[in-house]
Amino acid sequence: MLTPEQMVASQKANMETLYGLTAKAFEGMEKLVELNLQATKAALNESAQHAQAVLSVKDAQELIALQASLFQPMAEKAAAYSRHLYDIASGTTAEFGKAFEGKVAEGQAQFAALVDNAAKNAPAGSETAVAMMKSAVAAASNAFESVQKAVKQASDVAEANFNAVATSATNAAKNAGAAAKKAAR
């Protein structure tokens, strides 16, 4: 059984974990707000510059060339924004995952200690039940590790797919920009 001191220590550790996760969540939000502010400022500046450039255009061909020159940078900026957004989200999620894994490992260790303590104090003849309980604990631990590995693999695949899509979009924009420039000539 847990003593009052152990319960207080457990509650204190849980509160520290909660405060730590809350701080990480706020950190992620701060990064997101900062990213959006930077993107908005950049978009406003670029809009003003583009408007000035459009106003100084002398003919339709120059306007088409100007528009074509915007495709590639816009795609690259969109890909960079998406990458930053993904990095913020994955970093924050990783912090939460680490905390969860730590708590699960702590809970597993406490449960294993409880089972060991029960095994030491079990009456004679209960060895089979104790062995079954230890086997169940080991199976649960293995299952959790398998789930962790599957989630990690899925995350890796998702990140690879994200990178492939971003690269593909950037390349498509480059090709479209080059084609538009050729057409303008």
Image (cartoon, rainbow, N blue to C red):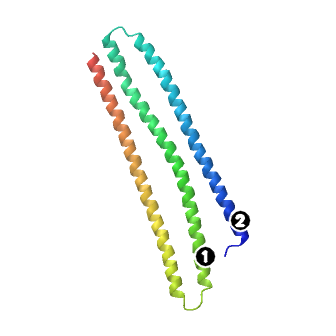
Residue, far top: 58
Mark 1 highlights which residue? 114
Q: Quadrant of residue 174?
A: top left
**Looking at the picture, which amino acid does disc 1 mark?**
Leu
Q: Residue at x 66, y 60 (%)?
A: 13
Q: Residue at x 60, y 51 (%)?
A: 21
Q: Residues within 10 Å of mark 2 (few under 14, many from 20)?
A: few
If the image is split into quadrants, where does the C terminus sit? top left
Looking at the picture, how far across and down is residue 24, in whole percent?
A: 59, 47
Against 8, residue 92 (above or below) is above
Residue, far right: 5
**Looking at the picture, which amino acid does disc 2 mark?**
Val
Looking at the picture, how far across and down is residue 25, in whole percent?
A: 58, 47
Q: Residue at x 49, y 78 (%)?
A: 135
Q: Residues within 10 Å of mark 1 (few under 14, many from 20)?
A: few
Against 1, residue 36 (above or below) is above
Q: Earlier in the sequence, mark 1 or mark 2?
A: 2
Q: Quadrant of residue 125?
A: bottom right
Marking on residue 8:
2
Whether pointer 1 and pointer 2 mark residues with C-beta atoms closer than 8 Å, the reply is no
What distance separates the C-alpha of mark 1 from that of mark 2?
Answer: 18 Å
75 on left or right of 183: right
Disc 1 or disc 2, which is closer to the eye?
Answer: 2
